[in-house]
Amino acid sequence: MSSRLEEARRRFRSNLTERQQRGVRVLTWASIVCLVGVSVTGAWQFVTHESDPGWYGYEPGSDVRVAASPSEGVAELHGLFAAGVAVVALVGGAWFAYRVLYDIPWPAVVALLGALAGLITGSVIRFNLVKLQDREYDDAGRGYAQLFGGDVEFVVTDRWELGPMAIRLWTIGHVLTLPILLAVIWFGLPHADGAES
């Protein structure tokens, strides 16, 4: 199987100019760096993100919105890597489709849609405040893992006040965007069996 896969790779490379091969290598490394970066910083955010003390005066059901603190440190880095994933999916996919394949491959479209879904769900779940039942705002712990405990009353994000089930579903949706994206791209790539026909 590995020799067949290597043969498919050799055929693919032989159809590319040297300049296109360099472009594919740059695109590959940019993808790897962005995906590793977004994964590592995302895992760090999942464990360490905490409520913003500026929101401790929040009244439930209130339309009053406190100005959210700007992202700092790992949160900012996670946002940059997430934007990098979107840029690589958009620009890299467009370049690859136009210059190499002369066609728009569906994995490139799915990659772009997955990156956009990750950006949207990520902006929805970034919480400013977690309210646990029968506790004060400052008693909430850190990270998103606490949202899956049974004592979450509500969570306040930049836009909404979300109940426990809504924030869990949005968080699961955000966490799943990367593995789903990788699976679709992996299974969408031409494999050796398809290359030999």
Image (cartoon, rainbow, N blue to C red):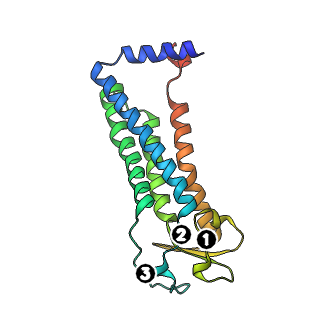
Label 1: element kind: loop
Marks 2 and 3 sit apart, C-alpha to C-alpha, by: 16 Å
Residue 20 picture quarter: top left
Identify which residue is drawn at 42% across, 32% down: 105
Mark toward the start of the polypeptide (2 vs 3):
2
Label 3: element kind: loop
> Residue tagged by mark 2?
50
Identify which residue is drawn at 48% across, 59% down: 122
Question: Label 2 amino acid?
Answer: Glu
Q: Which mark is residue 66?
A: 3
Vertical relation: 116 (above or below) 111: below
Identify which residue is drawn at 41% across, 18% down: 12
Label 2: element kind: loop
Q: Which mark is residue 163?
A: none
Question: Label 3 amino acid?
Answer: Val
Circle 1/circle 2 CB separation < 8 Å = yes
Marks 3 and 1 sit apart, C-alpha to C-alpha, by: 20 Å
Marks 1 and 2 sit apart, C-alpha to C-alpha, by: 7 Å
Question: Label 1 amino acid?
Answer: Gly
Vertical relation: 72 (above or below) 93: below
Residue nearer the viewer, 187 or 55 = 55
Q: Position of residue 82 (x, y in %)?
A: 42, 51
